Image (spheres, rainbow, N blue to C red):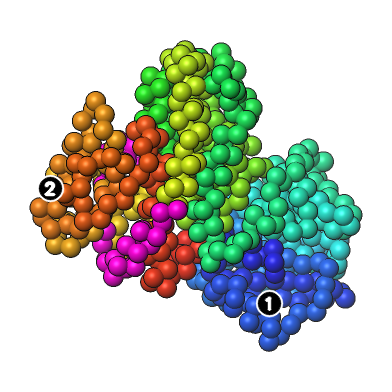
Amino acid sequence: MGGLRRLEYRGYDSGGVALVGDGTLISAKKAGKLLNLDAELAERPLPVAHTGIGHTRWATHGAPNDVNAHPHLDETGRIAVVHNGIIENFAVLRAELEATGHELVSETDTETVAHLLHDELERTADLSDAVRAVCRRLEGAFTLVICDADHPDVVVGARRNSPLVVGRGDGENFLGSDVAAFIEFTRDAVELGQDQVVTITPDDIVVTDFFGAPAATKEYHVDWDVSAAEKGGYDWFMLKEIAEQPQAVADTLLGRHSQGGQLQLDEMRLSDGELRDVDRIVIIACGTASYAGLVAKYAIEHWTRIPCEVELASEFRYRDPILDKSTLVVAISQSGETMDTLMAIRYARQQKARVLSICNTNGSTIPRESDAVIYTHAGPEIAVASTKGFLSQIVACYLLALYLAQVKGTKYGDEIASIIAEIDKTPAGIQRMLDEGDQVRKLATELAGSRSILFLGRHVGFPVALEGALKLKELAYIHAEGFAAGELKHGPIALVERGLPVFVVVPPKGRDQLQEKTVSSIQEIRARGALTIVLAEDGDEDVVPYADHLIRLPKVPTILQPLVATVPLQIFAAEFANQLGNDVDQPRNLAKSVTVE
Ligand code: AGP
């Protein structure tokens, strides 16, 4: 159950287990969070066994109830299957099974696999062969993990488009959607490729393709341990991850630059020549990662003069985008498994574009399918709401932009060194925002009855506003929207009414008049009754008369401001949700890795 609990962040509509021992298979499953399964197992304990599988579900086919929970069994109850992904041809398979007399009890696509396996195992006694034969019939995305009462020491897994990793132990081996499942027992992992079947026994790991030919695998050592996947004294993972941000940012920067500011990105498998040829950058990502991409656009265009677009991965390939080998596609993903982003990458590579991914999860699919990768090294992010993932993605984007500036010669070495020196100071600035978090927590307590909150920003403050609003939407389930402050007067200002809380991120003072224009926006909304919560740098006295609440930010260059300005918005959303009694780590309807399109 420990492993399953550490995977619960991936989906929490239901949980289930199946164990094999003494020639029988026993299973238990329950809708809702794992606590419900715990209660069921306390009432009806399962026997001790050494072979078993478990699942936490994010529902796609069929409501999140007990019957649709995994594992799914064949009619004889000897085979148990858990599945992530979507089997696209399941309706045809189901009709075929029903026509041959099978009775399916759930509405899921997964159950078809258990029945297909039953039929295959009448043709072959080898479980792995049967799994391969069934996989050859399936379309769509799937990770399958299977056990069978007649093969008590064997678990078979298969993957296409969905994640599955192997843990190599001593006299025991493991499978998991990510390494958190088995980190308590081993940090030695084996990456599986696309369309592979893995058979584990206590002493062996055998990997083949779907036709039984031996397949190459890659082994790696996980650079964090079980304590990183525990709450460590915090009430919520999200609070721990917010607090870890100074370290996460420092770890993203670690070893990437020399004293003289010369940048080295070890995982950059594109040559300097190839990078010099890049004449356009397209960033693809989803949700929070796409907001990191919006910040990156400002940095990339400002420092490298390479035109840069940011596009939601789910939209990208459907508009026939213009790509060629001089286009660098940058895919940003904390999990490395987001299906929309993965499909966009595959499309981009088919069009001959080069793909560089920025990712936090070693061994995940997106970096494996990219031409180059910059890992963020932020450590595991468990809370569904991304926090340290976001800040470390932004830092990795800065590093990429500066690396391109270095290669293309659009910035002198000493300029790059001085920007890097400023980035190096940001962990201290982030720490200060954490230390001053009580002001924001108090504010969240006061505003916890609000049903609508707006967030405004300009320049890189605009993606910060979008991120502040997304955090609040996903955790507090209220109306929250981020706007470019200059856009307000073109429509959204109609939303402003007496008492409406509006956060405004004020850019540092500079030659561009952005600060002055943002102060004007604050005046405009305040004149219409808004309750203004202003985030402005130390020493900015212009905002004081118009701020109902003033959150001070350390002085940093404009482009780096998201690293400090986002932190109070994260703390606010977490505390707001806490006040409402919501589950801060596992908000309703969501899953951490969205592995379906
Ligand atoms: C953020 O709080 C979200 N839960 C979500 O928007 C997330 O950032 C998005 O699904 C992308 O995930 P990825 O970075 O793992 O690809």
Q: Mark 1 falls on what kind of element?
A: strand
Q: Which mark is residue 116?
A: none
Determine the residue positioned at 45% across, 66% down.
588
Residue 452 magenta: yes
Q: Nearer the viewer, residue 68 or 445?
A: 445
Determine the residue positioned at 50% across, 64% down.
586
With respect to residue 362, does 13 lie above or below?
A: below
Q: Quadrant of residue 1?
A: bottom right
Determine the residue positioned at 35% across, 59% down.
439
Give the residue furthest to the left.
527
Q: Is mark 1 within 8 Å of ligand 1?
A: no
Residue depth check, mark 1 versus mark 2: number of the one nearer the observer = 2
Which kind of residue does numbered mark 2 sit on? Glu
With respect to residue 141, does 272 lie above or below?
A: above
Q: Which residue is mark 1?
A: 28
Q: Which mark is residue 524?
A: 2
110 to the left or right of 281: right
Crowd tier of the residue under label 2, counting other residues whose Cα lies within 10 Å: few below 14, some 14–19, many 20 or above: some
Q: Which stretch appears magenta?
A: 435-463
84 to the left or right of 117: left
Q: Is mark 2 within 8 Å of ligand 1?
A: no
Determine the residue positioned at 27% across, 52% down.
550
Residue 450 in percent (x, y) is at 27, 66
447 to the left or right of 199: left
